Amino acid sequence: MNWITNIVRPKIHALVPGKQHDLPENLWIKCPNCGAMLFHRDLEQNLKVCQHCGHHLRMEVTQRLDMLFDDSSYRTIELPRAAVDPLKFRDQKKYTDRLRDYQAATGRDDAIVVAYGEISSIPTVIAAFDFGFMGGSMGVAVGEGIVAAARLAILQQSPLIVIPASGGARMQEGMLSLMQMPRTTIAVQQVREAGLPFIVLLTDPTTGGVSASFAMLGDIHIAEPASQIGFAGARVIQETIRETLPKGFQRAEYLMEHGMVDMVVARKDLPETIGKILHLLRRPLPSAEIVRLPFRPAKANLRAIVGGKDAKKRGPLKDRKRKDTDGDEPV
């Protein structure tokens, strides 16, 4: 609860009686970094980036795909069906019930979307995580999605871009979830063996088993500003080693300074930057033009080297007599 819910909304309801049900609940969104109140339309137009402090809020998968693909034109593929609740897991509720709730809320089967289209006129395959689906956790279905994306990229001879936003492996699937780490690593290796680029766009957060597998195996790593990237949480690490962590630890800028990330790119610049990278990797510039030098006969060149300027006056080399008088007149 906040002052918008307690004060502003009741006043708006008083001004427009009888139409309260038409008022959306999320007209204003609070920036988690600076605390500024952001109008939802302004935030959408600014690609979910705070116009006051530049903080990058989490972006919905469909919006991200619309932003990256040319003219927001792309197609999604149907992913292979995975076993539902293989361990019959239950915590506060049944795993099957939890899955059903998230599927109803997000409109998708699991936490990954695989799409293909063009970026800067280059056919490209993208596998993007949905953090809104159980925190983007990686289970068997997500592993199947990464494998399917790799196979599609190889089939189409297209670059593969993966956009993780995940808290790590999905605990409800236990060891089966951890097995997706080697599976996705093998899928990435197959893309490399096919001679295709593999690019990873790291978003907030990229942690756990995702960062310990395919997410850190890209040919090029791009990160959004201030994204959290790591394996274990900073609090867990600090309590384990009993030392104060450096400022900005596990953030994109810190990782770039230490060689784990190639570049940190603002969200508005991502389509252009990725397009340039794809052009460099898939459509390299032509080789330099070969300029032919004027032809000179070998004898003329040798004469000029040995005889100097007076070589022509002194005649051909074969007609000149060697003088061995104490080396006073070398040939």
Image (spheres, helix red, strand yellow):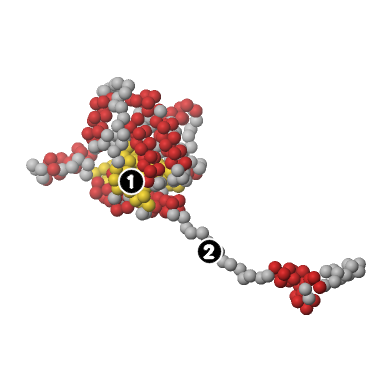
The image quadrant where one finds the C terminus is bottom right
26 left or right of 256 in image: left
242 left or right of 98 in image: right
Q: Which kind of residue does numbered mark 1 sit on?
A: Tyr
Instruction: Return the x and y of residue 136 as percentages of the image width and height.
Output: 33, 35
> As rendered, which of 25 and 108 lies closer to the eye?
108
Instruction: Tell me which residue sits at (32%, 37%) in the image.
Output: 112
Above or below, 58 against 119 in this view is above
Q: Is residue 50 visible?
A: no
Instruction: Tell me which residue sits at (31%, 30%) in the image.
Output: 82
Badge 2 element? loop
Which residue is the extreme one toward the front? Answer: 318
Which residue is the extreme one toward the bottom? Answer: 313
Instruction: Tell me which residue sits at (43%, 41%) in the image.
Output: 191
Which residue is the extreme one toward the right? Answer: 326
Instruction: Return the x and y of residue 163 as percentages of the image width and height.
Output: 37, 41
Residue 289 numbered tag? 2
The image quadrant where one finds the N terminus is top left
288 left or right of 299 in image: left
Q: Residues within 10 Å of mark 2 (few under 14, many from 20)?
A: few
Nearer-N-terminus badge (2/1): 1
Q: Quadrant of residue 326?
A: bottom right
> As rendered, which of 296 and 124 lies closer to the eye?
296
> Which residue is disc 1 drawn over?
116
Above or below, 231 against 290 in this view is above
CA–CA distance in space, label 2 to label 1: 36 Å
Instruction: Return the x and y of residue 99 as percentages of the image width and height.
Output: 26, 29
Instruction: Return the x and y of residue 17 as percentages of the image width and height.
Output: 9, 43
Q: How many marks?
A: 2
Q: Residues within 10 Å of mark 1 (few under 14, many from 20)?
A: many
Above or below, 94 against 262 in this view is above
Q: Which kind of residue does numbered mark 2 sit on?
A: Glu
